């Protein structure tokens, strides 16, 4: 009677698993490769944490978002923010330190929706985002107008944890992740561009991962 060659099957299965893991890890399979911007690797161990190391501990009930500069001054507390129309988004995210994550599920308020609830001067061209850890990052209104830009409070169906910028962070998935301020505290509307924390320290002012706009 012919017996299947268990050893051969095992060896082949191990090879398949190895190749599959390599594909996930490095973007060597074509579907992954097409979604990975140049020079990026898919993070294999969940969503990495990157920041200045301060990680402020803000409770939802203590959180405030201040609108300032070339816009009507206004403050949102958690209740006011949570009352705005909410969406769920599934997007990829790319970090300049070369990891990417696929299919991040976030929930919050789309930028396009948020704009309906504030009064921005016609002279405004850029926004400086301010965070509770002192971090800043600048974005032109034209980039904020791109799809999937949002102010988010949840990830994977749960409140955004402290490490990833809870209670509320910016989500700008078409640019490198440093453009998304964690522990969001303020939006300062500007009539000209000013560079944020990393942008004055050699990071690219625009940060398109598909063009590898990493450093300037
Ligand atoms: N407030 C704040 N936001 C921040 C940072 C920071 O140091 N402070 N780091 C930025 C950088 S460099 C990256 S890569 C992403 C990382 O987000 P994550 O830790 O959720 O992966 O947050 C960005 N937003
Ligand atoms: Mo980063």
Image (tube, helix red, strand yellow):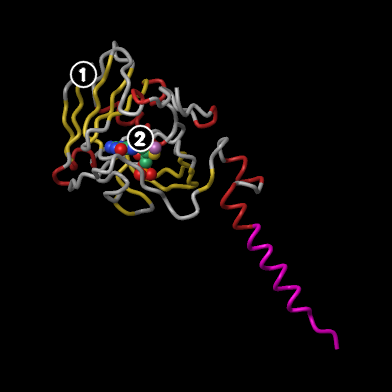
Residue 121: mark in rendering: none
Which of the four quarters of the rendered structure image does ligand 2 lie in?
Answer: top left
Which class describes the residues within 10 Å of circle 2: few (<14), some (14-19), or many (20+)?
many
The residues bearing labels 2 and 1 have C-alpha atoms spaced at a distance of 19 Å
Residue located at (24% from left, 23% from top) = 188
Query: Residue 36: where, in percent of width, then height?
Result: 56, 40
Is residue 109 visible in the rendered image? The answer is: no
Q: Residue furthest bottom?
A: 1
> Is 49 situated above or below 117?
below
Do we see residue 186 in this rendering?
A: yes
Range of residues picked out in magenta: 1-19
Q: Which residue is mark 2?
A: 180
Q: Quadrant of the C terminus?
A: top left
Q: Most extreme residue toward the right, as rendered?
A: 1
Q: Which residue is mark 1?
A: 69
Query: Ligand 1 closer than 8 Å to the CB at disc 1?
Result: no
Residue at image location 26% in from the left, 19% down from the top:
120
Left or right: 162, with 26 as reference point? left
Q: Is residue 215 left or right of residue 160?
A: right
């Amino acid at each position: 009677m012919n017996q299947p060659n268990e050893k051969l099957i095992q060896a082949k299965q191990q090879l398949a698993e190895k190749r599959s893991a390599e594909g996930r890890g490095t973007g060597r399979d074509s579907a992954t490769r097409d979604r990975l911007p140049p020079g990026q690797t898919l993070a294999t161990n969940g969503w990495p944490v990157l920041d200045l190391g301060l990680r402020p501990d803000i409770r939802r009930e203590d959180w405030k978002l201040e609108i300032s500069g070339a816009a009507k001054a206004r403050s949102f507390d958690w209740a006011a923010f949570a009352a705005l129309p909410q969406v769920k988004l599934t997007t990829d995210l790319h970090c300049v330190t070369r990891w990417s994550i696929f299919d991040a599920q976030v929930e919050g308020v789309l930028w396009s929706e948020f704009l309906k609830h504030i009064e921005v001067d016609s002279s405004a061209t850029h926004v400086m985002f301010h965070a509770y850890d002192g971090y800043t990052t600048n974005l032109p209104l034209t980039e904020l107008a791109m799809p999937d830009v949002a102010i988010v409070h949840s990830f994977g169906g749960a409140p955004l944890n402290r490490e990833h910028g809870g209670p509320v962070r910016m989500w700008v998935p078409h640019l490198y992740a440093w453009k998304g301020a964690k522990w969001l505290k303020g939006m300062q509307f500007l009539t000209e561009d000013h560079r944020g924390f990393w942008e004055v320290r050699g990071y690219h002012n625009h940060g398109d991962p598909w063009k590898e706009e990493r450093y300037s």
